[in-house]
Image (cartoon, rainbow, N blue to C red):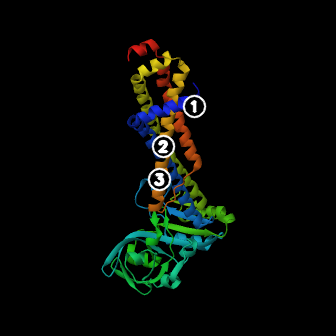
Amino acid sequence: MNILENFKMSAAMLAANKLQTSLTMLGIIMGNASVIATIGLGQGSQKLANEQLKSLGPNILFVMPGNQKSRQTTFNVPKTLVWEDAQAIASQVSTIKAVAPEINQRQLISYRNRNTNVTLVGTNSEYSSVRDFPVAIGRFINQIDLKRNQRVAVIGSEIAENLSLLRYPIGEKIRINNISFEIIGVMEPKGSFFGINQDESIIIPLTTMANQIVGQISPHGVALSVIHIEAKSTDTVRAAKFQIENLLRLRHQITTEDDFGVRTSKQMMSIVKTITSGLTIMLVGIASISLIVGGIGVMNIMLVSVTERTPEIGLRKALGATQGDILIQFLIEAVIIAISGGVIGIMLGVSILVLVGLMFPLSPVIASETIFLSLGISGGIGLGFGVIPAQRAAKLDPIVALRSS
């Protein structure tokens, strides 16, 4: 009997037992869908993070308070960076172009009878250029606003909609911490950055933030959440990092472990890639368990099928079918189940990714190599887990099999 006839016979047998075949496929379907969706979401997250970091530019550095251990083990940001540190960096480091210190905090703001929670950012006039965050309407905060502790605010593009502000909200008053602020500008849409929606942020002068909103929270000066720094060029990033670290060590009189961290955008991209890749591998490993469970399900159902079809196997052997014919037929059935389940699972996984892409600001990656790899693994699982039932069917004694009919 040739392969084509075996294939036709196997397909006919599976079609005759639709419910049993469908239940056998279920584990393979869920396993493939999980793998496709997990890899697609992981690669999409990594791509989004890289795009966000690239949008900052290759010559951006971040100075963060606290050492690496304290940033990982505490919820409160350590108060080890102050405004004077940022001023010293701006005046003494020759390889940098601009410095934008930042204080950020969640605050409830109100406009007339509407309220919303936003990320309130206190910073200086260079923040817009360093973060590549231009103004769409009005103006950004300037040095006069900082010197006079002006109660002015530049709002994110979604704030106006959330508070039902006018189409041209310049001059309107909003209340932050029960203090009235005048809107002087609206930022262009920027999107999310590491889970924070920048279009739902409000930017005010750093001096106003420190003196009227957060108050004095460090004995050494105005405590900062982060310092954004733009180097003169990509060639000076390494030198800028070295000079900033040495300057802060001198200022903080550090002799052992640093109480701050300096990261370049390239380092941040590497960290993000490591984290997302690790999470993706872990989730794919968990999802792969579903494929193995599905393979075990194929083997169990095929063993039951061998028992149920013992008379048929005996009859075929009595008519001249060899052990090889029986073995190939059952292996083909297992592979058909696995590949069919794999195709359906891949379609389900791709549908999930498309749905996520439509509902969230994330573009999952649907890679053809992932699809082919998943389909190949499904076929391999069907072949591997179908060997034992196929061997049992092939070794049945035809006389014993016919007697059981």
Dot 2: few (<14), some (14–19), or many (≥20) neighbours within 10 Å? many
Label 1 sits on residue: 4
Q: Badge 1: few (under 14), some or many (20 or more) residues near its Cα, within 10 Å?
A: few
Disc number at residue 32? 2
Q: Residue furthest bottom?
A: 171
Instruction: Name the quadrant of the N terminus.
Output: top right
Return the x and y of residue 318 as percentages of the image width and height.
49, 15
The residue lying at 47 percent from left, 45 percent from top is 345
Q: Secondary structure at mark 1?
A: helix
Q: Which type of secondary structure does the marked residue at label 2 adopt?
A: helix
Residue 46 coordinates in the image, percent (x, y): 54, 55
**Three-letter residue code for mark 2:** Asn
Q: Residue at x 58, y 49 (%)?
A: 368
Q: Earlier in the sequence, mark 1 or mark 3?
A: 1
What kind of residue is marked 3?
Ser
Give the residue pinned by disc 3. 351
